[in-house]
């Protein structure tokens, strides 16, 4: 016989998946606005953050209600604790998408500095990490979660590459400094999105296996 808490936990999982979809869409639209130089789309991303914030509040309230009404223990308690943390990571991703959109609006005031190749690629990797981290959570798939963590290095490497390239632009021509700094900041925002996806993946491993892999603990445990 299904417990009442199981119904609520399933709803919590569904709400987290919905919020993840909103965050992923916001990230994709923010980067598309940058690449296509679409100011209207950038403004839509900024406006759309209200829906993500509303979902954030709703999930927190659902978690608190579950704790208050059911006094969960063991695995249920761990699941709800992880939901709190994952919700926070998703909300921050939405904020970072807004940051990208706001920086895009600033960059649109000047001519395009260079063709954008690495930043969109970096964003694709980060979006895939977000998607897979939530898939790992829903399926409670520790192996997929570990793969997400491993892919964070590729995002970091692209971010470093972008920084070095833009630093060269600034050194060669001071007139490019404002645009270069804007693109560097966008790279940093995307890199932070990947970090939040990694946080979720690490939480999934803890949820499923009861052990932490933060700070490269996985290297010592394998």
Image (cartoon, rainbow, N blue to C red):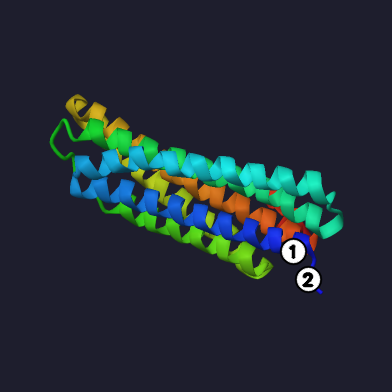
Indicate the position of residue 177 as horizontal and vertical percent values: 25, 27
Dots 1 and 2: beta carbons under 8 Å?
yes
Q: Nearer the viewer, residue 77 or 120?
A: 77
Residue appearing at x 62%, y 49% in the figure: 86
Q: Is residue 34 left or right of residue 25?
A: left
Name of the residue lying farthest toward the left: 111
Q: Nearer the viewer, residue 64 or 45?
A: 64
Vertical arrangement, residue 43 with respect to residue 83, above or below: above
Q: Badge 2: how crowded within 10 Å, few (<14), some, or many (20+)? A: few
For residue 126, which quarter of the picture?
A: bottom left
Q: Is residue 16 left or right of residue 190?
A: right
Residue appearing at x 23%, y 49% in the figure: 35
Indicate the position of residue 220 as horizontal and vertical percent values: 77, 57
Vertical arrangement, residue 111 with respect to residue 69, above or below: above
Marker disc for residue 177: none
* Spatial separation of the CA atoms under disc 1 and disc 2: 7 Å
Q: Nearer the viewer, residue 58 or 73?
A: 58
Q: Quadrant of the C terminus?
A: bottom right
Indicate the position of residue 148 as horizontal and vertical percent values: 56, 61
Query: Circle 2 is placed at which residue position?
Result: 2
Q: Is residue 48 left or right of residue 155?
A: left
Name of the residue lying farthest toward the top: 174
Marker disc for residue 6: 1
Indicate the position of residue 186 as horizontal and vertical percent values: 36, 39
Q: Tag 1's secondary structure? A: helix
Residue appearing at x 49%, y 61% in the figure: 131
For residue 105, which quarter of the picture?
A: top left
- Is residue 153 at least partly visible in the picture? no
């Amino acid at each position: 016989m299904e417990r009442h808490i199981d119904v609520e936990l399933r709803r919590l999982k569904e709400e987290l998946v919905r919020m993840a979809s909103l965050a992923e869409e916001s990230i994709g639209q923010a980067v598309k606005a940058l690449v296509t130089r679409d100011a209207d789309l950038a403004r839509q991303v900024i406006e759309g953050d209200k829906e993500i914030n509303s979902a954030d509040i709703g999930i927190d309230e659902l978690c608190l209600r579950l704790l208050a009404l059911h006094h969960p223990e063991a695995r249920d308690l761990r699941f709800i604790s992880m939901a709190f943390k994952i919700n926070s990571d998703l909300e921050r991703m939405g904020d970072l998408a807004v940051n990208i959109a706001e920086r895009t609006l600033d960059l649109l005031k000047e001519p395009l500095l260079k063709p954008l190749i690495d930043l969109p690629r970096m964003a694709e990797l980060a979006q895939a990490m977000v998607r897979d981290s939530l898939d790992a959570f829903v399926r409670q798939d520790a192996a997929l979660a570990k793969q997400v963590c491993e892919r964070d290095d590729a995002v970091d490497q692209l971010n470093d590459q972008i920084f070095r390239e833009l630093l060269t632009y600034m050194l060669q021509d001071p007139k490019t400094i404002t645009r270069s700094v804007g693109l560097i900041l966008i790279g940093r925002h995307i890199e932070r999105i990947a970090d939040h996806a990694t946080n979720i993946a690490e939480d999934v491993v803890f949820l499923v296996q009861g052990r932490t892999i933060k700070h490269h603990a996985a290297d010592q445990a394998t």
